[in-house]
Image (cartoon, rainbow, N blue to C red):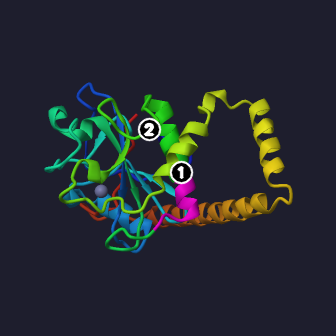
Amino acid sequence: MDEPGALWCPSPNYFPGRRGQRPRWIIVHGTAGFASAEEVVAFFQHPETEASTHYVIGRDGRIFQLVREADAAWGNGVVSRGHDRWWEPLGNPNYVTLSIEHHKLRRDNGDELTAAQKRASFLLIAHLCERHGIPRRWADAQGGITGHFSLDPEGRSYCPGPYPWDELFSYLAGSDPPHQMGPARSRAAEQTLSDRDPTGAGLRQQLAELREVAAAFQRRLINVELELARLQGQERPPGSRTIKRSPRR
Ligand SMILES: [Zn+2]
């Protein structure tokens, strides 16, 4: 799908196309509960939920994509009193937004992102900005990045809850657009990193975290393969929420 490495788990809950508009804002959400990212994904895949986001990021850093970026997910429909001023004249904000859910365990969204979740979130946001020309800054009338609270301060003041905004914006300010990242640039980046980290402790930590993420991907891969094997030769019950729509080309 749109984001390399994301797991495609299509949801039927979206508007096809964007009525000629393009996404200009990224809206950050927290799930306020749910035992696992898979549960969140299944919830958004259920037609009766009538809600979805483009992406869900698990606490292990896995990224699930539910709606194509060219389509309008049903994540940001309600605009309530006290919202940022630019939303109202736009009509339905879903046509101009991309939305990202972050799996959080606490009902009040009080938990911080995990390190893996934060890295995945920053990288995804950088890619979305790059793909759609979205300003890499706090949202204003022209576009940018903000939380669900910006649209619905009455109902969703706690969404996404704690999120490392300052870190995100310094990351985005320092990150090069992917098309400028040649091998020469990567070597330069490694040089700087080992200068700042002469014992390699930081790199070892990073490696350990990446291995965790890789192991989680491996587990997911095996689960999907097993599931697929199980389904071959087995008729799915009609209306089952696990029926997958074919990705549209
Ligand atoms: Zn939200």
Question: Which class describes the residues within 10 Å of circle 1: few (<14), some (14-19), or many (20+)?
Answer: few
Q: Check the image and report above or below for 75 versus 145.
A: below
Instruction: Pick whichever, 238 or 54, lies toward us.
Output: 54
- Residue 216, position as x, y percentages in the image: 60, 65
Mark toward the start of the polypeptide (2 vs 1): 2
Do labels 2 and 1 touch, CB within 8 Å?
Answer: no
| 17 w.r.t. 49: above or below | above
Residue located beneath label 1 in the image: 167
Figure quadrant, ligand 1: bottom left
Query: On residue 137, which mark appears?
Result: 2
Is 121 positioned to the left or the right of 183 in the image? left
Say which element carries label 1.
Answer: helix
Q: Is residue 179 magenta?
A: no
Q: Quadrant of residue 240?
A: bottom left
Amino acid at dot 1: Glu
Mark 2 and mark 1: Cα distance apart in space: 12 Å
In the rendered structure, the answer to whether residue 224 lies left or right of residue 65 reads right
Count of numbered marks: 2
Residue 23 found in image quarter: top left
Residue 61 can be seen in this image? no
Q: Is residue 208 left or right of residue 240?
A: right
> Which segment did they paint magenta?
112-120
What residue appears at the point 43 percent right and 30 percent down from the top-left corner? 132
116 on left or right of 80: right
Q: Amino acid at mark 2?
A: Arg
